[in-house]
Image (spheres, rainbow, N blue to C red):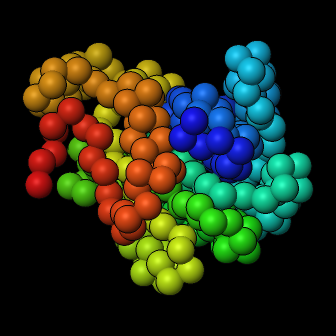
Amino acid sequence: MLLQDRVAFITGAGSGIGRAIAQAFAGQGAKVALVDLDLEAARRAAGEIGDAGGVALALRADVSSPVEVNTAVEAAAGAFGGLDILVNNAGICPLEPLEGISLESWNHVLAVNLTGAFLCAQAALPYLRRSRHGRIINLGSVAGRIGGLAVGAHYSVSKAGLMCLTKVLAKLLAGEGITANSISPGTTETALTAGWDAPVKESLRQQIPLGRLGSPEDVAAAALFLASDGAAYMTGATLDVNGGLLMF
């Protein structure tokens, strides 16, 4: 198994991409801490993993709170004896026009999507340093590369910042054997996009060469690779998982 006995701390793991990543990691032998603001959702997802024979722990945390992040990291590391992999997936995406974004909303999106990842990395770092397989995986977005049209400006900016944070972490931590990479999904079928207007989603689909929106499992497969030994020589990179919507 690719992640046998490694410990993963995954934020936003109660549903969508985070849930799919937790399932993929557990299926490859990892012990997973599923962290979510919605504790019941995290418990349901952890229960599914347990029913499938995996090892999972559900934790509640608001990733924009340093106290709650530190408490959750310590709980996961205490339960599983350490921490090897951090997946910063938690995020929010209000659909607000530029002129309608309040300063409060702007600050809240950046606090969750960007500052939350920084706080989790900071809290996890002592444990990652003790691991022989330290991995940080940040969930960016194609909107952070090109600027989003269907999403708010605050979301796009937060994801661009997150991908830059990935490079900073990669440079600072490479000498300690810790890698940091990001994944840049295109539009993905999750609860986040379920409420989008059908014409908007259809317009996006028509722009994708592979002809469909992404699935959480598409993104989870990329995360599994980055967490594995197969990606040991990759750091500071961004994997685009967008069906060909954006090509470099």
147, 176: nearer the viewer: 176
Residue 199 vs 174, above or below: the answer is above
- When asked about the image quadrant of residue 15, the answer is top right
Residue 238, percent across and down?
32, 57
* Residue 157 appears in the rendering: no
Q: Quadrant of residue 145?
A: bottom left
**Residue 229 locus on image (x, y percent):** 48, 53
Q: Nearer the viewer, residue 187 or 78?
A: 78
Name the residue located 12 percent from the left edge and 48 percent from the top edge.
247
Q: Quadrant of the C terminus?
A: bottom left
Q: Is residue 156 left or right of residue 16?
A: left
Estimate the x, y position of residue 84 in percent, counting from the top left.
66, 58
Q: Is residue 27 above or below residue 129?
A: above
Q: Is residue 174 above or below residue 134?
A: below
Q: Residue at x 29, y 16 (%)?
A: 198
Question: Quarter of the image containing the N terminus?
Answer: top right
State left or right for residue 100 relative to residue 242.
right
